[in-house]
Image: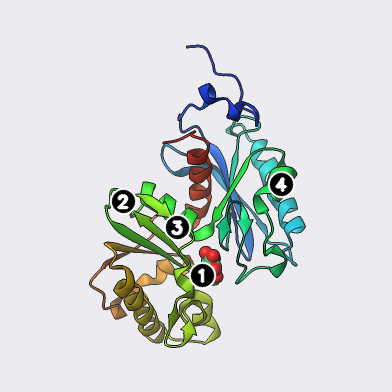
């Protein structure tokens, strides 16, 4: 078989070069404290080589973030295992993203509001970019390669970090921008009480935290009756401390992809969008 020509932005518009071949792509995960990137093996849902991480610049304005994303892409592109030059890049952002535009900025610089992040990054990187909510990316990755693999019906991935992120997956398909972290529970925006950062800020013991988290998850369970909850975020590795307080009828497990879920999900989303993966 002849070797396919190297991809670039224009090639992607030609149908016959959309190969569904799951070739590796770059994923970038924009967070409040760090921006992380990696080259993703889309067959296995794993990183090829190490992650690259740069602290999030402060103030985290669109220009400053775009510069750091470009730096990470440059570093990853110089590696031997780098994807073809000009291949598209998947990026996550911790807010509502619809048609590439940021519609919420609960825990990030407010200058992002109504910014076309897709356009800003496409222009800065000079190659196609697809941006997706951070928790949605983690959810996609868990559904395909992790704890949600093969689970039918509703799977809710809840990430506990600075805020509470959520991904709503139904029969393996993502229903984007669910924002279940902002449900009102007992008169409060849930993430202000039950996120990992809220636990630290309020100096809660694990037992106290477990009670609050249980209250939140019971409410989510009541509304959506999922088949499975998958808990992600840094404190998922301490689940032994608070899972005993959860009284749910829904099965609950921790995320499998850990720190890489956002990067993997970002690359998967852009691959699906450009029909480079199925
Ligand atoms: C945001 C979500 C985000 C989550 C986790 C929330 O405050 O509204 O969009 O997914 O934090 O970063």
Q: Please determine whether, in this image, residue 139 is positioned above or below residue 39.
A: below
Q: Quadrant of ligand 1?
A: bottom right
- Report the residue marked by disc 1: 161
- Report the residue marked by disc 2: 171
**Percent position (x, y) of residue 244?**
29, 77
User: In the drawing, does residue 38 fall left or right of residue 225?
Assistant: right
Separation of marks 3 and 1 at Cα, in angstroms = 12 Å
Q: Earlier in the sequence, mark 2 or mark 4?
A: 4
Q: Please determine whether, in this image, residue 8 is positioned above or below residue 122.
A: above
**Percent position (x, y) of residue 65?**
71, 56
Numbered badge on residue 258: 3
Q: Earlier in the sequence, mark 3 or mark 4?
A: 4
Question: Which residue is at a point 63% across and 56% down the rendered structure image?
Answer: 101
Separation of marks 1 and 2 at Cα, in angstroms = 26 Å
Depth check, mark 3 against mark 1: the one in front is 1
Depth check, mark 1 against mark 2: the one in front is 2
**Percent position (x, y) of residue 203?**
51, 87
Instruction: Classify mark 4: helix, strand or loop.
Output: helix
Separation of marks 3 and 2 at Cα, in angstroms = 22 Å
Asked if the residues shown at circle 2 and circle 4 are in contact, with their CB atoms under 8 angstroms apart, the answer is: no
Instruction: Classify mark 2: helix, strand or loop.
Output: loop
- Residue 257 in view of the camera: no
- Report the residue marked by disc 4: 70
Asked if the residues shown at circle 3 and circle 4 are in contact, with their CB atoms under 8 angstroms apart, the answer is: no
Depth check, mark 3 against mark 4: the one in front is 4
Separation of marks 2 and 4 at Cα, in angstroms = 35 Å
Q: Is mark 1 within 8 Å of ligand 1?
A: yes
User: In what quadrant of the picture does the C terminus appear?
Assistant: top left
Neighbour tally class for label 3: few under 14, some 14-19, many 20 plus, Cα within 10 Å: some
**Percent position (x, y) of residue 50?**
56, 46
Question: Which residue is at a point 66% across and 37% down the rendered structure image?
Answer: 77
């Amino acid at each position: 078989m002849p070797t396919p020509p190297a991809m670039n932005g224009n090639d992607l518009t030609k149908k016959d070069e959309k190969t569904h071949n799951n070739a590796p792509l770059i994923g970038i995960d924009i967070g409040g404290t760090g921006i992380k990137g990696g080259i993703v093996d889309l067959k296995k849902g794993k990183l090829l080589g190490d992650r690259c991480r740069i602290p999030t610049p402060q103030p985290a304005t669109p220009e400053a973030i775009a510069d750091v994303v470009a730096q990470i892409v440059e570093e990853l592109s110089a590696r031997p295992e780098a994807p073809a030059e000009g291949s598209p890049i998947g990026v996550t952002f911790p807010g509502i993203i619809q048609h590439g535009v940021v519609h919420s900025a609960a825990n990030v610089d407010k200058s992002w509001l109504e910014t076309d992040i897709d356009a800003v990054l496409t222009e800065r990187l000079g190659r196609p970019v697809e941006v997706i909510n951070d928790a949605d990316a983690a959810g996609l990755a868990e559904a395909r390669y992790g704890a949600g693999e093969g689970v039918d019906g509703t799977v809710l991935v809840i990430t506990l970090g600075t805020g509470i992120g959520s991904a709503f997956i139904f029969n393996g398909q993502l229903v984007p921008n669910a924002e279940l972290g902002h449900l009102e529970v007992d008169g409060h925006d849930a993430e202000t009480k039950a996120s990992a950062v809220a636990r630290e800020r309020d100096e809660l013991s694990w037992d106290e935290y477990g009670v609050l988290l249980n209250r939140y998850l019971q409410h989510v369970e009541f509304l959506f009756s999922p088949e499975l909850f998958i808990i992600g975020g840094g404190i998922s590795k301490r689940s032994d401390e608070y899972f005993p307080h959860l009284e749910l009828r829904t099965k609950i497990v921790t995320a499998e992809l850990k720190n890489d879920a956002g990067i993997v999900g970002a690359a998967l989303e852009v691959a699906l969008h450009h029909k480079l993966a199925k």
